Image (cartoon, rainbow, N blue to C red):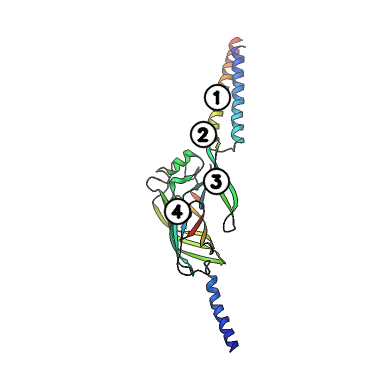
Amino acid sequence: MTRSSLLILTSLLAIAGSLTTLLWWAGSGAAWFTLQRVLTTQTIVDEFGDSVAKEIWVEKFVPGLLDLAGPIAGALLVVAALGLWLSRKDLNYAK
Amino acid sequence: MRHLMTAAILATSAIALPALADTPFAGKTGALSFSVDAGKSQLSFLSDAPMEKFKGTAEGITGDFKVADAANPGSVTGKIVVPVGKMKTGNDLRDTHMKSPDWLNAAANPNITFEIEKAELSKIEGNRASGKAHGKFSLNGKTIGKDLSIDVAYAGDRNAIKVTAKFRVSLKDHDIKGKAGVAGSKVGEVIEVEATLYGAGK
């Protein structure tokens, strides 16, 4: 495998990683900032006979776009762009 | 004579019935005291800003309130205390920021309090009532007069009470400036609060 091919493969993997990170973020709740717990609501009937929304925190990691998924996806895209640029440079030299 | 007695009973009932209907504490006389059940009571708040919307809760709500005269439910006084340190929003970093001197300053002002001075219950049906509670609301060390919309339910057999309140808190009213550029963009300038307090008779 030539250096150019390796760089292209690395770039493609980085793009795939970036897209996977964004899909992971979107599938996990698409939060702006990372959450360590989420608020869940249970409807219960209280001692007064009223339906009440009881809110309980549940420990759950939800990745945030601005403080986790975004920077990771961005860094991977930078790696991909760099790889593609270097591979193009190698190909130009080879010509 | 019988007609006279019937008329007297009817007249007495006509006077007495509205008096009974004016309080959710029917059947009780004198003063009633309650203490807030911290385990059952809950408070949630919602910040709806253009860049971010989040919900949080406050745990460990304590307090006491007293109705001086069961026949006059407006004669309520007391104090509700919400510890800032037990407020959560789901994000640890945001919780730390929320309690920092830029925001609620938990170190200097560890509690949010509402000192109830009186209530005006406009709608009373059986042992339920709704209206407004007036008092002094303290947050970030700044106290303002505030009216809270309340719903009250009373269980006479257990001498237990439930009060739900909905109100809005303006950050500006309490000199909460926050970090530059955050209040109004990531944190709402007005916070919606909803509280359900369960009180046990003392």
Secondary element at image label 1? helix
Q: Nearer the viewer, residue B50 or B135?
A: B135
Q: Classify B115 as above or below A74.
A: below
**Residue occupied by mark 4:** B62
Same chain check for tags 4 and 1: no
Question: Observer-nearest residue: A40 or B8?
Answer: B8
The mark that comes first in sequence, 2 or 3, is 3
Give x and y (percent) for residue B58: 48, 48
Identify the residue position indicated by label 3 in the image: A56
- Give the amino acid at mark 2: Asp
Residue on which disc 2 sits: A67
Answer left or right for A1 relative to A71.
right
Q: Confirm or deny contact between disc 3 and disc 4 (CB under 8 A).
A: no
Q: Which residue is mark 1?
A: A78
- Same chain for the residues at labels 2 and 3, yes or no? yes
Q: Amino acid at mark 4?
A: Thr
Q: Residue at x 51, y 60 (%)?
A: B161
Disc 4 to disc 1, C-alpha distance: 53 Å
Q: Position of residue B150 (x, y in %)?
A: 52, 60
Crowdedness of circle 4 by 10 Å Cα count: few (<14), some, many (20+)? some
Image height of A9 relative to B66, above or below: above
C-beta proximity under 8 Å, tags 2 and 3: no
